[in-house]
Amino acid sequence: MATKFDTPELFKNIEIIDTPKYEVDSMAHSSPYLAKAQHNENLGFPGELVDNWEEKAVTRLGELVDGSRALRTFLDSCVKCGACTDKCHYYLGTKDPKNMPVARQDLLRSIYRRYYTFSGKYFPKLVGARDMDKSVLDEWYSYFHQCSQCRRCSVFCPYGIDTAEISMAARDIMDSVGHGQKYCNEILGKLQTIGNNLGLPEKALINTLEDLEEEVEEDTGVAVKYPVDVKGADVLLIVPSADFFAEPHIDGLIGYGKVFHQAGISWTLSSYASEAANFSMFIGSGDNLKKVAQRIRDAAEELGVKRIIVGECGHAWRVAYSFWNTLVGPFDFLDPRYPAPQHIVEFTYDLIQRGALNLDKEANDHRRITFHDSCNVARASRMGNLPGGQFILPRALITASANHFFDMSPETTHENTFCCGGGGGLLTDDLMEIRIKGAMPRMQALKQVVDEHDVNSMVAICAICKAQFNKALPAYQFPMDMITSLHQVVGDAIQLGTKE
Amino acid sequence: MTLSVVYAIFFYAATLLLIAGVARKIVIYARTPAPLKIPTTPAPTTKAGVVWRMTKEVTVFQSLFKANKWIWLFGWVFHVALALVLFRHLRYFQEPVWTVVVLIQPFGQYAGFAMLAGLAGLWARRFLVDRVRYITSLSDHLMLALLVAIGLSGLAIKYLAHTDIVAFKAWMLGLMYFDLQPLPSDIFVLLHLSLVIILMVIFPISKLLHVPGLFFMPTRNQVDNPREVRHTAGWTAK
C-alpha cells in the first residue's frame, strides 16, 4: 500500500491553480485497508462481503434513494455541464478523471440508472448505465475513498449537487454488504466502547490533563485548570481527542483552558464523551451518527451543565451545529440564552467583544499568520448570527490576538476553500499518496503568501486539518510547525493574571 | 387528414406523458424526506432569504457563473432564448393573442438564433474541453442534437420554406378544443412537430429532470437554522 510516489510540484508566482489534462486511472491503485470482521460487526455491519452482495447492494441503494431527497434529486438531475470538473482538489492533485466530482458521482449514478430508471433499464449503453459487479465494487472502494466530502463541488454546481452525499451513500452501501474501511470503522468502534477515537481510557485521560496543568503552570506561573467530569460546571467542552496529545492540537487545548480561566467561567471535559469527532458521518451511517451524538447529550445531562461548547474540529462542528438538534435534541435542559451547541470560537469571540479577555497582540509578533478555512466549517455550518460568520469570527480572533495576518487568495478561502487533503475518513497512512497529492491546491495558495508576505504560521480550526498538514507541509518543503491551532494564538496573547 | 389525426394522437399522448411523468417525479421528490439539514453554507437564515437564493439560481444561474464563465454564457443564453421562444409560441395556442406575446414576437425570432448559438457553444465544449469530453455520454450528444434539430427546423419554417401558418394555428387550436382541423403537410412542420413530441416524451425520463429537481435540492432550498429550529424528517423523525 505504501507505494512510492512523486509529490506534485508547486509553481512559482501562479495566482490561479492550474487545471491539468487528465490521465486515466492514474490513481486506480489507491485503496485503503479493508476493515476486519470485528470492526464491521462492532458497528452492526456484516463482517465480510456477504453472499448475494450485488443484489443486496442494489437493494440498499434503493432504500437510500427512497430515504433521501438529496440523493434522489442529485442522481436524477446532473446534466454533465462540466462546471465541477476542475473544482476537486483530488482531481487537481492527481489528474485522475474519476476524481472529477461528476465522474465520481457517475460511479454510483451508473448503477442507479441501471436498476432504478427507465432509460438505464432499457437503454443502458446510451446513458452510461452498468451492472453491479466486482469491478464496480472495487472502483467504488477506491474512488469513494478519494473523496474527502468537502463539498467544494456543491458550491459550484448550478443545482447544488453535493458529491459528499453520494460518497456517504456509497460507503453506507459498502458497509451494508460487509465491505467497510478499516480506518473509519475501527475508530468508531473505539469511540463507542472507550469514549474516544484514540481509545484513551478514563484514567489515562485524567493523567494527561494533570500533566498538562503542571506544564502550563510551569510555563506561565498560573494554575490554569483542565477539569474532567466536574458535576455542576457551567460548560461541558467537547473536543476532538487529538487535542489531548497531538501537536499542535494540544496547544489549542491549552488555549481553551486559558480563555475559560481568564473569563472565570467554570467548565469541564467528560471522560464518557471525550470525543467531538463523529466518523459516522463519513461512512454515511445514520444509526451510528445518532448513537455517538447521544453520548454527548447523556454526558451533558449527567454532569448537569448549562452549556455545551465544541472545540476546534471541522466535521465535528458540522455534526454538532447541523445535526445534533435533529438527532438528539431538543436541548431544552440547557441555558436558553446561549446557542446549543456553541463553537469555542463563538464563545471566545463573545468574550473579546465584551472585553472579558486581556490580549497582548505583541506576544504573537514572531508569527506571520494565514488562516485555512476548514471545509466542514466553511461549507456545512455557521458561526455567529450572520451567514458567513464562520469566516469572520476565526479571523477576528486572530486579528485580536496578533499583528500580522495575511489571507490566502480568495479563490482558496471562505466557501472556496480547498480541503487539507485528509478529511472525510482519509486521514490514514494507507492513503498517504492521495492525501499528499490532494493537498497540492492548498499548498500552492500557501506558497503564494509565504513568498509574498513571509507567512510562517498557518492557523486551522480542525483536528484533521492539523494532523494532515503535519504530513503535507514537509512533503511540500514547508516547515512542519507552521501549522498552528487558533486557540494557541489566542492563548499566547492572553495576559494571565491581569483579570482574574 | 390522416396525417392530422396521427399527429394529433401523438401530440395528445406526448402531452399526457410529459405532464404525468413530471407530476409523478414532483410527487416523488416532495414525498422523499430530507432527514438532515445540509444546506451548502453560507446559506440564508430565513425563508425569504432562501427564496432570494433560489431566484438567483433560477434566473441568473449564480453558482454556475461562479464556476465557469463559458458554460454560464452558453447555458444562460440558451435557457433565456428558449424561454423567449417558448413564450413566442404561445400565439399558436391562443386566440386572441395576448398583447405581450404580440410584442415579443420579433425578440422571439432572434432568440431562435441565440438559442442555437448557445447550444453550439455547449456542444463544442463536449468536443474541445478534454474533461467535458470525458464525462459526456452518447445521450448527452443526442440531447443536444435533438434541441439543435428542433431549433433548425423551427427557423426553417420561418425563413426557408414558409408554411401556411394560419392553417397550422387552426390545427393547434383544433387540438385544444377537440375540433380537429387539417395539418399543413410541409416537411419542416412535420419534422419540427415530431422532434418536439420526442422531447416531450423523454423529458420525464432524462436529465431534463434538472428542471423540477433544482427546486427540491436540500443543499440550496434549506434554511440555515438547525440550532434555532429542530428539523426532523424520515429516519430522524422516528
Image (cartoon, rainbow, N blue to C red):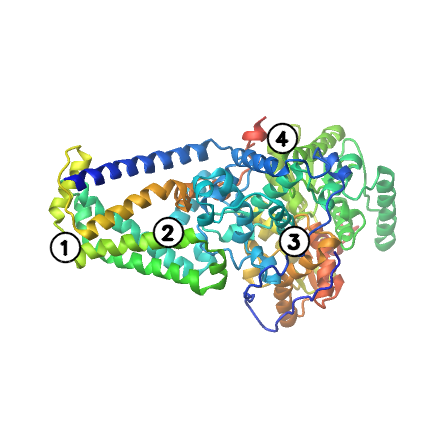
Q: CA distance from mark 2 to mark 1?
A: 27 Å
The picture places residue A24, in percent across and down from the top left corner, at: 58, 61
Do badges 3 and 2 share one subunit?
Answer: no
Q: Which residue is mark 3?
A: A397
Is label 2 in contact with label 1 (beta carbons under 8 Å)?
no
Q: Which residue is mark 4?
A: A329
In this rendering, does residue A365 appear at all?
no
The picture places residue B17, in percent across and down from the top left corner, at: 33, 36
Q: Amino acid at mark 4?
A: Gly
Crowding at dot 4, Cα within 10 Å, few <14 / some 14-19 / many 20+, comes out as some
Q: Which residue is mark 1?
A: B162
Between B216 and A181, the one lying in front of the other is A181
Chain under numbered label 3 = A
Between A125 and A149, the one lying in front of the other is A125
Location of residue A54 by image quarter: top right
Mark 4 or 1, closer to the camera: 1
Is label 2 in contact with label 4 (beta carbons under 8 Å)?
no
Do badges 3 and 1 share one subunit?
Answer: no
Mark 4 or 3, closer to the camera: 4
The picture places residue B91, in percent across and down from the top left corner, at: 18, 45
Q: Which residue is mark 2?
A: B143
Q: CA distance from mark 3 to mark 2?
A: 52 Å
Task: Please tell me which of labels 4 and 3 falls first in the chain.
Answer: 4
Q: CA distance from mark 3 to mark 1?
A: 71 Å
Q: Amino acid at mark 3?
A: Leu
